Image (cartoon, rainbow, N blue to C red):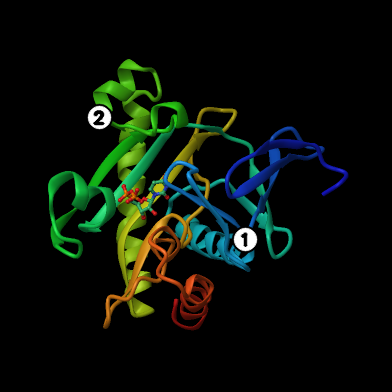
Amino acid sequence: MEEHKLLYEGKAKKVYETEDPQQLIVSYKDDATAFNGLKKGTISGKGAINNQMTNLLMKRLEQIGVPTHLIRELSSRETLVKRVSIIPLEVIVRNLAAGSFSKRYGVVEGVVFDQPTLEFSYKNDALGDPLINSSHAIALKLATPEELDAIRRYSFAVNDFLKALWAECGVILVDFKLEFGRLADGTVVLADEISPDTCRLWDAKTHEKLDKDRFRRDLGGVEDAYQQVMRRLLEHG
Ligand code: UDP
């Protein structure tokens, strides 16, 4: 990537400029962080898995009418994407109680919801990504009401599709985080990644965790879990 200018380096990805101002290269790292950067580590092979899983899933989502930033995979850990300005919201969809939901409301992990939930966090490291509602997001001019409608619609469509796809693989899609961006013409598209870093994935039979919670909670077998979900997706997805 020597020939490309580094535009941005995040916790798990680097973003490079290309000759085309509307296209960027995302390079996925093996670095892992949790708890707003307090816990740091490496998950060997994660960059390639997250890159390939994100691209496989985004390709499928495009086919069901969810627009994404994906252009094409360049290598095992690099992908060409459309340049977007990221809407600073973490959009979280949940099918079962886990993580911060369980903590906030005092619910044991694994309670199944009758309907999926949707929530937003304001992407702001200095504030610790606080929970935010849609009227606050509009007041802060993070997104327009129309953009929030599109984000809600796409997020539930992504959930319906991915829940069924993971079920085919013997995996429960517990919850996940999406990020959306605006193209130069204002179109809202799905951006960022969809991977075991951003989804909770449990084995359907044993409820074994096959995602970043293994890293967050020091459960061991992190690399194996990432490899296993990727393999299951390639075999059954
Ligand atoms: N998530 C994420 N990035 C974040 C926060 C959450 O990708 O900065 C994902 C997380 O992996 C999980 C879902 O969003 O699949 C819901 O996370 P939760 O709100 O329960 O927060 P956590 O317990 O991970 O702090």
Q: Residue at x 53, y 59 (%)?
A: 54
Q: Which residue is mark 1?
A: 47
Position of residue 150 measured from the top left corner of the image (x, y, whole percent):
35, 37
Task: Indicate the quadrant containing the C terminus: top left, top right, bottom left or bottom right.
Answer: bottom left
Mark 1 sits near ligand 1, with its Cβ under 8 Å away: no
Position of residue 215 measured from the top left corner of the image (x, y, whole percent):
45, 62
In this image, 106 relative to 30: left or right? left
Q: Residues within 10 Å of mark 2 (few under 14, many from 20)?
A: few
The residue sitting at the right extreme is 3
| In front: label 1 or label 2 | 1
Q: Earlier in the sequence, mark 1 or mark 2?
A: 1
Question: Looking at the picture, which amino acid does disc 2 mark?
Answer: Asn
Mark 2 sits near ligand 1, with its Cβ under 8 Å away: no
Relative to the observer, which residue lies in front, 209 or 52?
209
In this image, 182 relative to 76: left or right? left
Labelled pair 1, 2 in contact (Cβ < 8 Å) = no
Provide the secondary structure element on which disc 2 rests: loop
Position of residue 226 measured from the top left corner of the image (x, y, whole percent):
50, 71
Q: Quadrant of residue 43?
A: bottom right
Relative to the observer, which residue lies in front, 59 or 142?
142
Q: Quadrant of residue 9?
A: top right
Q: Residue at x 15, y 55 (%)?
A: 115
Provide the secondary structure element on which disc 1 rests: helix
Position of residue 30 measured from the top left corner of the image (x, y, whole percent):
62, 59
Q: Residues within 10 Å of mark 1 (few under 14, many from 20)?
A: many
Relative to the observer, which residue lies in front, 135 or 184?
135
Question: Looking at the picture, which amino acid does disc 1 mark?
Answer: Gly
In the displayed structure, 106 sits above or below 170; it is: above
User: How far, Cα to Cα, is label 1 from label 2?
Assistant: 32 Å
Q: Which residue is mark 2?
A: 133
